[in-house]
Amino acid sequence: MDRLNKDIIPAEMQGVIAAYFNKIRAQYSTHHISFTLEGLNLFMETGRVTEIPDFMYTYLTPPQRLALLKNIINSVDDGSFTPRIVRSDKLSVPSPICICAPSEQNIIIYYFSPNKGQYIFHLQELSLVHAFHDFLVYLPESSMVYSEEESKELLHSVYEKYKNLYN
């Protein structure tokens, strides 16, 4: 929240954003979250959050990036969060892209084009939404992602890499 651009985001909207992030955090254990190693490294190098338009915040600092990754690792280690890292050799994903399925009735796709900026697509056409949703639910159980243990090891290695780089 300290990275938000408070000059353009009114206080009441800041409260809405905080509530949204608290809601997401509470749902981590029941949601399927997958990402690429390339995307994680891009985040660790830049501090940029794909889902949030650039004008709304200042990118996270290296210590904030490390703290966030450490919190993710702690949640993985205690079993409250189970992300899966996508195997780029099995599934090519343009970066940076984020596909969210907040419900079975809508999909939100965030894409950042280096040349043209950010695009946000909100899909509500049910045949497309169901196809995306089914794929996102299937992905963590597929051979297109690293195993739970491999994903955990990769998170730890990325953390160590950037901890050594930033300290």
Image (cartoon, rainbow, N blue to C red):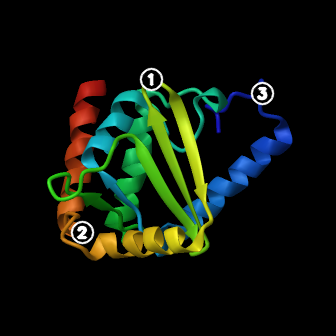
Q: Which residue is label 2 attached to? A: 148
Name the residue furthest left.
89
* Whether label 2 touches label 1, CB < 8 Å: no
In the rendered image, residue 26, in percent from the top left (x then y), is placed at 58, 67
Classify mark 1: residues with Cα within 10 Å, few (<14), some (14-19) or many (20+).
few
CA gap, disc 1 and disc 3: 24 Å
Q: Residue at x 47, y 36 (%)?
A: 112
Q: Viewer-nearest of labels 3 and 2?
A: 3
Classify mark 2: residues with Cα within 10 Å, few (<14), some (14-19) or many (20+).
some
Classify mark 3: residues with Cα within 10 Å, few (<14), some (14-19) or many (20+).
few
In the image shown, does 116 or 146 lie closer to the viewer? 116
- Give the quarter of the figure containing the N terminus: top right
CA gap, disc 3 and disc 2: 40 Å
Element assignment for label 3: loop
Left or right, 136 with reference to 110: left
- Give the quarter of the figure containing the C terminus: top left
Element assignment for label 1: loop
In the image shown, does 141 or 147 lie closer to the viewer? 141
Q: Which residue is label 3 attached to? A: 8
Q: Which residue is label 1 attached to? A: 115
The kind of residue tagged 1 is Asn
The kind of residue tagged 3 is Ile
Ranked by sequence position, the earlier of labels 1 and 3 is: 3
Left or right, 5 with reference to 71: right
